[in-house]
Image (cartoon, helix red, strand yellow):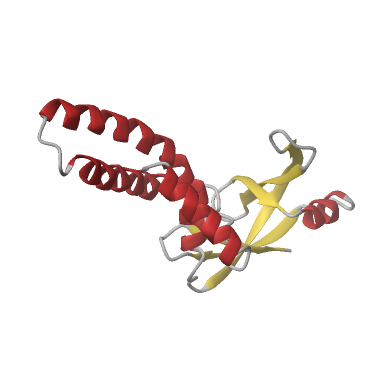
Amino acid sequence: MPFAIPMLLTFALVIFVGESWPRNIAPGSSLKMPGFGAAVLTSLIAWHFATRSIADRRVHKMAALICAVVGLMGWLVWSVGVLPSVNGLSLGPQEAVQMTLERTEVTTVSRSRDLNHWAWLRPEAPNPRAHAGRYFIPEGIYQQWNDPRPSTVTVTIAKGLLGAQVVTSFE
């Protein structure tokens, strides 16, 4: 149950929302701790419902262990599945940041022939909102940045509902 809930929510978001909410989280602005909190809360709720009518303390302990382990499996699903979509539901003011393009790379999607395209970017000026790191970019931007390789690019970011920075566009 603690693993099934974030999976079902992720599938529901994919079906009903799709890509209409931006969910590309900027490096250095993760949702790991909120995801951990959601996993712990889900595990506690599942443990409560599983043991509420059982009086044996040994069953409570075993159910707590199982819910904790399965809840930790759901931590990743919360952190990269549900929460980035919820974070993109409402965005604050957008900010354009000039960044230096260090390099681009391509990786393969696990068990697929599809490709992920990445850019290693570094802010030109120190910026508390935009951090250096590997940014996920669309294939069209990857092609555009590899033809005549620009030295600087513009990344537009905005603070999301849960506080993580969301990349809204690349130029």
Screen quadrant of the C terminus: bottom right
Whether residue 30 is visible, yes or no, is no
Give the x, y percent position of residue 128.
47, 56
Residue drawn at x 36%, y 38% as measured from the top left = 71
As displayed, is residue 60 above or below residue 133?
A: above
Residue at the right extreme, as displayed: 147
Residue placed at 85% from the left, 52% from the top?
Answer: 143
Q: Where is residue 81 in the image (x, y as percent from the top left)?
A: 51, 50
Residue 120 image-quadrant placement: top right
Residue 31, percent from left and from top: 44, 50
Question: Measuring 80% from the left and 38% from the top, which residue is drawn there?
Answer: 113
| Among the 4 quarters of the image, the one containing residue 32 | top left
Seen from this angle, which residue lies furthest bottom?
A: 93
158 horizontally vs 20: left or right: left
Q: Can residue 63 be seen in this view?
A: yes
In this rendering, position of residue 45 left or right of residue 23: left
Which quadrant does the N terminus fall into?
top left
Q: Could you tell me which residue is drawn at 58 percent across and 46 percent down?
A: 132
Q: Would you say 111 lies left or right of 66 here?
A: right
Number of residue marks: 0
| Residue 79, x across and y down, in percent | 46, 47
Is 30 drawn above or below residue 65 in the view shown?
A: below
